[in-house]
Image (cartoon, rainbow, N blue to C red):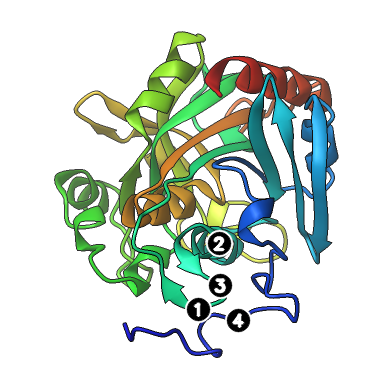
């Protein structure tokens, strides 16, 4: 990388903020709650003691404030790892690039990402309205393959066994496996949350085995995911963001944890009776305990 970042690479708004997130360094806390739904941002920030900054561009909404004396930002990413690439990359840029000089800062600023989202269960005993802390993100999206020094995330025994046992289609991106931050994960497990590997799909319908008018390439994919075991690890749930957050955080030197509310069980056909109430419970528990 050159000493100075070109305007075509580090894209900024007229006020000097990063292009999509509309953020300057003083607007961003070191601890960041990530949510998919823009409408969930004010729900989370309503539990703050104070809010000192708000901004929005497209589906990316940010509120920054304090809770019990600790500064926290909550940011919506929208859906999918393509949006995660934009948001996490720009948050890292705010933290670790001098936006005025367009140079990398000499000292690394580590961020903490806590994703609170919704997902579908791939295990019959993980019911709707329960919470799952992701030990790893198993990515089917291919995002990390575009970045240098990422081979270890896909060249490992877990992924090799997974590819073999589920007969992974070679036309699809090679899966990769990225871990959660161990300290954050331990806090979530201490609260009694379920824990396991979270599979991250590239879409909501066909990529997660849903059939509307179009058939799917592998009708047994969900069953294969449910049955797969590597040592004591199993795939607990399916969503669309965790692998990107974990993969990029590992490559960039940040801490990350995803805690998902289960809204549906793909095998029992059950759906949450009141997922908004359950999400509020998750928000309170995360803010009061994990953070």
Task: Give the label, 2 or 1, closer to the camera.
Answer: 1
Query: Which quadrant is the N terminus positioned in?
Result: bottom left
- Say which label, 4 or 2, has the lower sequence index: 4
Tell me the tag on residue 99.
3
Residue 287 in the image: x percent, y percent?
A: 65, 22
Which quadrant of the view contains residue 32? top right
- Residue at which label 2 appears: 94
- Say which label, 2 or 1, has the lower sequence index: 2
Label 1–label 3 contact, CB within 8 A: yes
Residue 198 in the image: x percent, y percent?
A: 45, 38
Residue 89 in the image: x percent, y percent?
A: 51, 64
Left or right of 37, for residue 264: left
Tell me the tag on residue 11.
4
Tell me the residue at 80%/66% (across/down): 57
Tell me the residue at 71%/58% (across/down): 212
Query: Which quadrant is the C terminus positioned in?
Result: top right
- Residue at which label 1 appears: 101
Q: Distance between the residues labelled 4 and 2?
A: 12 Å
- Say which label, 1 or 4, has the lower sequence index: 4
Task: Give the label, 3 or 2, closer to the camera.
Answer: 3
Looking at the rendered structure, the secondary structure element under dot 4 is loop
Mark 2 neighbour density, 10 Å: few (under 14) some (14–19) many (20 or more) = many
Label 3–label 2 contact, CB within 8 A: yes
Label 4–label 2 contact, CB within 8 A: no
């Amino acid at each position: 990388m050159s000493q100075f970042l070109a305007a075509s690479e580090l894209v900024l708004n007229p006020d000097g903020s990063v292009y999509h997130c509309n953020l300057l360094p003083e607007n961003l806390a070191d601890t960041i709650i990530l949510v998919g739904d823009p409408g969930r941002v004010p729900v989370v920030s309503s539990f703050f003691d104070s809010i000192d900054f708000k901004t929005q561009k497209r589906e990316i909404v940010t509120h920054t404030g304090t809770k019990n004396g600790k500064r926290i930002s909550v940011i919506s990413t929208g859906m999918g790892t393509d949006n995660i690439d934009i948001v996490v990359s720009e948050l890292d840029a705010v933290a670790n690039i001098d936006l005025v000089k367009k140079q990398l800062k000499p000292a690394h600023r580590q961020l903490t990402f806590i994703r609170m989202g919704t997902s579908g269960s791939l295990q019959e005993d993980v019911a709707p309205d329960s919470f799952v802390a992701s030990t790893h993100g198993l990515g089917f999206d291919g995002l990390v393959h575009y970045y240098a020094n990422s081979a270890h995330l896909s060249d490992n025994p877990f992924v090799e066994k997974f590819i073999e046992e589920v007969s992974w289609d070679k036309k699809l991106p090679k899966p990769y496996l990225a871990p959660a931050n161990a300290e954050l994960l331990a806090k979530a497990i201490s609260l009694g949350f379920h824990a396991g590997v979270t599979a991250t799909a590239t879409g909501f319908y066909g990529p997660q085995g849903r059939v509307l008018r179009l058939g799917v390439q592998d009708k047994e994919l969900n069953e294969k995911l449910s049955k797969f075991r590597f040592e004591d690890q199993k795939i607990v749930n399916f969503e669309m963001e965790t692998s990107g957050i974990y993969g990029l955080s590992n490559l960039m030197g940040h801490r990350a944890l995803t805690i998902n509310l289960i809204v549906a069980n793909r095998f029992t056909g059950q759906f949450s009776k009141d997922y908004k109430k359950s999400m509020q419970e998750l928000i309170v528990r995360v803010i009061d305990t994990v953070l």
